Image (cartoon, coloured by chain):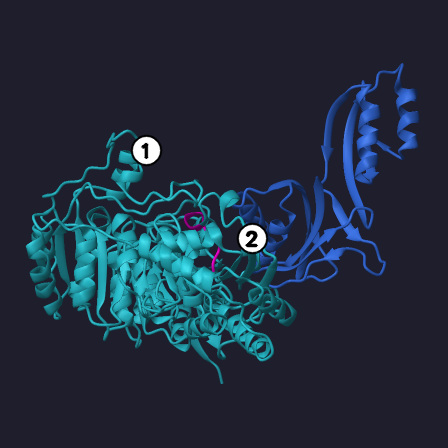
Chain colours: A blue, B cyan
Amino acid sequence: MQHVISVTVENKPGVLARIASMFARRDFNIHSLAVGPTEDPTRSRITMVVDGPEMEQIVKQLYKLVHTIKVVEHTPGEAIEREIMLVRVNADTLRRGEILEAANIFEAKAVDVGASTITFEVVGEPARLADFLEIMRTYGIVAQVKSGRIALAKDIKSPARKQKKTA
Amino acid sequence: MSQTITGADILIQALEREGVEVVFGVPGGAILKAYDSIFDSGIRHVLARHEQGAGHMASGYAHATGTTGVAFATSGPGATNLITPLADAYMDSIPVVAITAQVASASIGLDAFQEAHTWGISMPVTKHNYLVTDTSEISSTVHEAFHIAATGRPGPVLVDITKDALAGSIAWSGPSEIHLPGYKPSVKGHPKQVNAAIDMILASERPVLYAGGGIIRSEASEELRTFAEQQHLPVVTTLMARGAIPDSHELTLGMPGMHGSYTASTSMQKADLLIAVGARFDDRVTGDPQFFAPDARIIHVDVDPAEIGKIRTPDIPIVGDAKSVLTQLIDSGATALAHRPLPDRTPWFDQLAAWQRDYPLTYDQDPDGPIQQQYVIDELAKHSPPGTIVVAGVGQHQMWASQFWGFEEPKTWINSGGLGTMGYAVPAAIGAQQGRPDTMVLAIDGDGCFQMTFQELITAAVEGIPVKIAVMNNANLGMVRQWQRLFYNERYAGSELSATNPDVVMLAEAMGCAGFRAEHPDDVVPTIEKGLAVDDRPVVMEFVCDPDAMVFPMIKAGGSNDVIIMGPEDL
């Protein structure tokens, strides 16, 4: 089972290396990772999708890193989750209309058109990106690249299971 | 008005503010500026013969004094040679600050002479580490490093400082405050959990208090003893906790685990409740965790939340420092006992006494030889003053020292538990002796371990640090030989050393130490008497021991703690 966690860290050089090193040392697996600045310039937020049953240890080991400020594990359905994807699909002139019609349903934007391919940009919930890929697979996917997932807890009273920092 | 000051001076002054009296190190090109500053300071520098020695000296010093040990090394190979001691201190939660120099910041990444990526290499073996490239950040970084090393779960912290940051000058207006928004170790346990723990203890018929190295680190021996007496709890002390409660105390069962006493290991298997304090359910204690203490509920007290539930899910987790939580437990326990009796645990204590009677730790010394290490350890203990600090390397001699030395005080047993670093004893003993000059420090070492780091005895002789080293020379890597005999069909691949080469006595003398040798059981006591009488230089006492002796009891690695091999007859 995959879990989505947001890790708020001090915005210091090497903090990503520390997290990656800890995951390697503890034999945890990262499925995807996105790092970026936050509303506070002294903080960065890392959104991670992690595999495996060891969530409690992952959260505790993240907290052991001196630069970790807060770890939030998102409850499914209680966070806004987004990914961005670029997909290049085989699209000869005969099937182009059909493909564009399908893309339209997913609000996928054609961002590049070649002699025999179209490249789409899709932004949205991870499941939606997966569905779009499934449809496009029938035409033939030439290349695909996906960002790490980003997530933000919904603005409701108890939006996510927040684990209190103790070390 | 501010004055100008160099980074090197800032570094040394920061160490002085931290109360550092001694650093162990080896200089080199990149760190020379710092050495130039230490030359004029009140800090003593002990010149190790190898940076690994310097690192273990810092760790031995920290073990013996309860303060933070400091090691210095230059860039590149100096820093990489410190990695083993840092990994060792990390596994055993020993507060050490390593100061390493880095090539000039403009040269980083260009494969400069003696450049190594020290920050990256040391990251997984330190509690935290730093690369400082700016003179103005040296002071705050050093103070952060000491704070992190000594608080919460202690551990090593490395500060790598570039040559130009050490050489640079800045206007100095005094040290700045440390700022660590993500570092807030818990001290006190949650009161509700503490009360729940007392309820569980008072309902237990077969409890065992499982005391780990955290007791020593948080200086909680008094609290441990008071709590054990108040709640009438038998106590096992792990390899890292030997001396946490006196071995002569009636509640003490000794060391559990792979080479632990039958009673200590079996008490945990049969317990209905384990109260783990500052212990981490290490595989050398638990064997296969699936079969460990199957009937026991678990109360787990640890300052590191990540230790709780890592191996065994507790019924009552308590995050907090051992000393603080034990104090809370004592208070809560006293309140509870005011209107509730202790349960009758007579059958449990009768059972424990029966095991102790039926399965004692024993050995046979044939008067005609060969010498048994247990006999040497027994005689060393009889001839050493109370409070002697015993330091061990790793292997058979370490296990026998832990089994047969009666530890009566905390911080009198120093060894490499988690990492199992052969060669630890000689430099760690030197560090301990430097920190505790009025106490006898005795290293019990194997010949394999000794040959990894004996050159530090030159340091001890030159610097006037009169440690005593007992080398158990069985001409083999004894524990490796034992495993080869038991599990590898007696194929002794790569484990045979030599009984005569080196000549340990001549080697000791060549290094400026006194040297004595015992080859026959009759020589053991006279050799000890001669060795312990020397106090003006380091002493090496060599005991030529039985190469075929094996450490028992033994639980096979990864096996169940229900299956304890008591001796060759059980094989």
Q: How many dots with numbers?
A: 2
Q: Secondary structure at mark 2?
A: loop
The residue at which mark 2 appears reads as A14
Quarter location, residue B40? bottom left
Assess disc 2: are there few (<14), some (14-19) or many (≥20) residues with their C-alpha within 10 Å of its C-alpha: some
The location of residue B170, given as percent across then percent down, is 47, 72
How far apart are the alpha carbons under marks 1 and 2? 45 Å
The answer to whether B257 appears left or right of B434 in the picture is right
Quarter location, residue A89? top right
Q: Is residue B99 among the parts visible in the rendering?
A: no
The location of residue B363, given as percent across then percent down, is 21, 51
**Does B24 appear above or below B496?**
below
- Residue at 31% across / 63% down in the picture? B413
Assess disc 1: are there few (<14), some (14-19) or many (≥20) residues with their C-alpha within 10 Å of its C-alpha: few
Magenta residues (range): B279-285
Viewer-closest of B230 and B392:
B230
Q: Residue B281 magenta-drawn?
A: yes
The location of residue B100, given as percent across then percent down, is 38, 59
**Does B481 appear above or below B453?**
above
Q: Which mark is residue B487?
A: 1
Q: Amino acid at mark 2?
A: Gly
